[in-house]
Amino acid sequence: MLTNLHVKNLALIEEADVEFGPGLNILTGETGAGKSILLGSINLALGKKMTRDMIRDGADSALVELIFHIENEEIRRRLLELEVEIPEDQLIITRKLSGGRSISRINGESCTMAKLKEVSSLLLDIHGQHDHQSLLYKEKQLEILDSFGREELKGPLAETEQHWKEYRTLKKELAQYQLGEEERAREIAFLEFEINEIEEAELIPGEEAELEKRYRRMNNSRSIVQSLGLVYQLTGSGEGAGEQCGRAARELAVAAELDEGLKGLQDTLLDVDAILSDFNREISRYLEDFTFSEKEFYDTESRLDLINHLRAKFGNSVEEILQAREQKQKRLDTLVNFEAIRLELEQRLEKTEQQLLAASEKLSAVRRSCAERLTREIIAGLQDLNFLDVRFEIGFSRTPDYGRAGFDQIEFRISTNPGEAIRALDKVVSGGELSRIMLAIRTILADQDDTETLIFDEIDTGISGRTAQKVSEKMAEIGWNHQVLCITHLAQIAAMADHHYEIRKQVQEQETVTRIYTLSPEESVRELARILGGAEITEAVEHTAQEMKALAEKTKAEKAKKK
């Protein structure tokens, strides 16, 4: 259940904090007061696209926070499967828009938009005005039927989808075996040429690194020889450091014989002389061993050119080139055995299509059984909503090809008046009738799922009078088993509220702000009077509002007893 909504700096809302209760929560207010902003804020928290211009003028960021109290054990289990912990049965969803980017969190931990939507789908079911029109689409109608019969359809749907995936994969594979003989011969010749080109290179994994190292060494050999020759000259005999160090050692030996205190310095200099001599011999040995072969340099350079040529065609490394060869060999094998493979695929596709047909027929049979039950329940629900002479049926036809949900295409058909032919919804119903049909369907589905909170945005479109009263009773009935949030303009629906909230747009310090107020029973009656009376609220209107509220409470009590 949604227990709290907190909104800050979103559009006209500077800051709003609302505590919702169980049962039917009604939100009313003048046109333009910001009711749509309130519902929009909930949608934003649950993953709807958020843009910078939604932030209130003068603010740097906007925040929406939803707090849920989780009571349903099935919802708790499914949340835990999504690795969402529920400390003290509470779940908090926050979304903040700042600097052009939004951050969503569940219980303080940032989350992806995909996970946010998955979690929120377990907690809330939002039915906005656009959902009325979606009822006209056959895809939506099939979705409704499958949702109604999900327990019976779960197995057949899974089996059908499994065969469909295999069927689709085989069709894609078989589509690759439609080459003509001439085209196939050309591809075989080209593959053989490429494979031969790679095989003739006799590549060794990792060899390019060693070749590049050897090439750099040989390419820089002249500079190496010149540098080492100069080092040898500077540290060796003649005028080098070695000769000068030897002379210094000899002079210091003479001085040390005259003064024993110089013995330590003499030993140090002798060590330096020895180190220089060793160093000079190592350089001399390196230069003697260092050779440069023009042939070896040419072979190395040619090998690298060959590898780089193959890398440009087949991959960024010897390993990738060899992998490319394996893939080309597989394709070549396929083309060589083309007819045999195609025949095998055709046989497998035929068998899979038979399995898919059987699974789809089984699924369709279960669907038709579910459709009969759904038809009866929709008729009963529509009669509750003042469709007194309604006829309703679900028609079945087949799609041109299979889909993951089989081959069924369904159509909701209705007749709302005596003597009127039964026809598709889009050919018959008005906007008000469509909203009532959707309400009846939503009521049926709500009774079968675990979603605790249902939100209806202006379900009262195009209705009034006795019909509005029937809708209000249906909303209150849904509120027995679910928390319902409903935005309405009708007094009949607002009168049924277990909790009533008024949304007002006010001017404060030359700024327009939207605020939300929780109404007491007396304030709720005054709001009903405003809805009934418009600009002028007379004593008669106030009396009517009081009677309407009292009648609503009486109706709820009587229906609760019957339940």
Image (cartoon, rainbow, N blue to C red):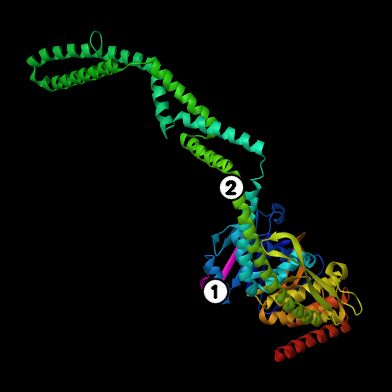
Question: Residue 120 in the image: x percent, y percent?
Answer: 62, 66
Count all numbered tags in the image, as a single digit.
2
Based on the picture, tell me whether residue 92 belongs to the magenta stretch: yes
Location of mark 1 (residue): 89
Question: Residue 452 in the image: x percent, y percent?
Answer: 64, 75
Q: How far apart are the alpha carbons under marks 2 and 1?
A: 62 Å
Instruction: Determine whether 124 is above or below 557 in the image.
Output: above
Q: What amino acid is found at the position of numbered circle 1 in the picture?
A: Asp
Instruction: Determine whether 212 is above or below 341 in the image.
Output: above
Q: Nearer the viewer, residue 283 or 172?
A: 172
* Residue 353: quarter of image: bottom right
Start-end of magenta stretch:
86-94
Mark 1 neighbour class, 10 Å CA radius: few under 14, some 14 to 19, many 20 or more: few
Quadrant the N terminus occupies: bottom right
Quadrant the C terminus occupies: bottom right
| Secondary structure category for the residue under label 1 | helix
Q: Nearer the viewer, mark 2 or mark 1?
A: 2
Which residue: 50% across, 28% down?
308
Which residue: 84% across, 72% down?
432
**Label whose residue precedes the other's in the sequence (2 or 1):** 1
Question: Residue 217 in the image: x percent, y percent?
Answer: 38, 22
Residue 340 marker: 2
Q: What amino acid is found at the position of numbered circle 2 in the picture?
A: Ala
Q: Is residue 214 left or right of residue 495?
A: left
Q: Nearer the viewer, residue 341 or 285?
A: 341
| Secondary structure category for the residue under label 2 | helix
Based on the picture, tell me whether residue 511 belongs to the magenta stretch: no
